[in-house]
Amino acid sequence: MPSPTTFRLRIDADAAIDGTGRIQAPASMLVEVAQTAEVLGGTPAGKVTLLSIDHPQRMANDPRANGAYVADCRGAVLIPGLVNAHAHLDLTHVGALSYDPKSGFTSFIRNVLSHRLSDPKLIQQSVMQGIELSMRGGIVAVGDVSGVANSKPCLAAYEALLASPLSGTSFLEFFAIGNAPFPELPVPTGSNAPGSRVRLGLSPHAPYTVSLTAYQQAERIAAQHNLPLCTHAAETVEERDFIGSATGPFRDFLEKAGWWNATVAGTGGVGNGLSPIKHLIPRLLAAPYLLAHVNQLSSEELRQLQQTRTSVAYCPRASDYFHAQAAFGPHRYRDMQVANLCVALGTDSVINLPAWTTQSKGRLSTLDDARYLYQRDEADPRLLLAMCTINGARALGLRAEAFRFPSTGDWGTGGGQEIAGVVAVPAPGTGDPFARVMACDTAPDLLVLGSPGFA
């Protein structure tokens, strides 16, 4: 790693806000950057220390700002670096695909599988494209679920994320149900050593492709190697029907794949009249999981989740792409947070996002998912900002305080808080800066990218 070049940057903006609901307006922010790399058009990456946030007039009299580079971001609002709690960056090369609800989710899965790459170098290129789009979207940390290569879990996506400036977790996805055996998982020794910027995790794909016994085996491996766990759950009608009655398109899918056998259904398996969440509850009680989607959730299931260490990654644009609200009603992300569950935002894959996402000026950003919820649900913009910063950090096990400005002390008097990054969001108009950020569609500008570290 090159020797860091340390410099100070003063950023003047209309306001600085974070997921705690605090506001400094107008704002002048002073950060110190120990730069170790040039990334994405010169965005400095390295250790970023927030020295002060204050009124510009007071910052002008702060001796620490003498000689600092000045970034004029008037007309913009400053927010912390963003988190994408659930992504599939190895599918970035595919681009947007249409979804036909009449053909169903299993037809969609077959379409995705037909586009999957098997060459590790090509997988890394797709992931790197996703990383670039993420940084254009103000993302500094990601929970990336990596698929298989040649039907086996591989480390190509993890290695690509490790080589990038981003932080987060690369979850190794696998299938293990019926005749599909538990795979050999390539977990490098010491992959999650203290101080790691990127962690390896395990992702048993979903309860319709992974047996509860295989989930339990994954938990043992995770505990042995200090690996976080993630899974997809309660996403589609087809999943609900298969888990409850062992019938429907997913049974056909397993039979055609040669995975179905008598162990899949019955005692300890599917077909016992349970919902996906109730089916998984024994495993969720046993270990902390990050659940992606959770489109189907009853009040009883919500109470059960309160007894676990579960976090949820909600991908609103993906849920609407698959017409989840028509099947299950409005997503209960707000009820979950009232129940003290950690709910973060994710993008899922570019497949279910607008085509402009992967175009020349495109981006991959949970800020766009937050804005989507602001328009669709009139959701609290403060809650939405927390979901794509602080909550995302908690869901991935990152230091949540690195995604606030800062976590201790009064703004304008503190100093020395290491942060995950600073994003400037052009936000026209006047009034509440939270609402201004969520009401527009402007591209966020990642000014500096830090290394928040894990909790």
Image (tube, helix red, strand yellow):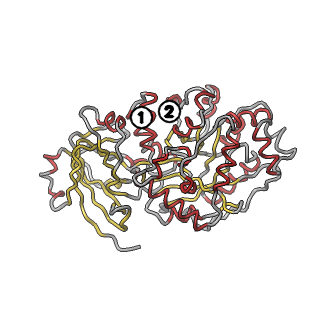
Of the pair 108 and 157, the residue shown nearer to us: 108
On residue 383, the disc is 1
Q: Nearer the viewer, mark 1 or mark 2?
A: 1
Q: Residue placed at 34% from the left, 42% from the top?
A: 18
Q: Is residue 426 left or right of residue 249?
A: left
Residue 173 lies in quadrant: bottom right
Please say if the residues under marks 1 and 2 sit with CB atoms less than 8 Å apart. Answer: yes
Q: Is residue 399 visible?
A: yes
The spot of residue 286 in percent (x, y) is: 67, 44
Measure the C-alpha gap from mark 1 to mark 2. Answer: 9 Å
Disc 2 packing (10 Å; few <14; some 14–19; many ≥20):
some
Kind of residue at disc 1: Leu
Q: Is residue 397 left or right of residue 180?
A: left
In this rendering, is residue 34 above or below 315?
A: below
The spot of residue 62 in percent (x, y) is: 15, 53
Q: Is residue 327 left or right of residue 45?
A: right
Kind of residue at disc 2: Gln
Q: Residue placed at 16% from the left, 62% from the top?
A: 67
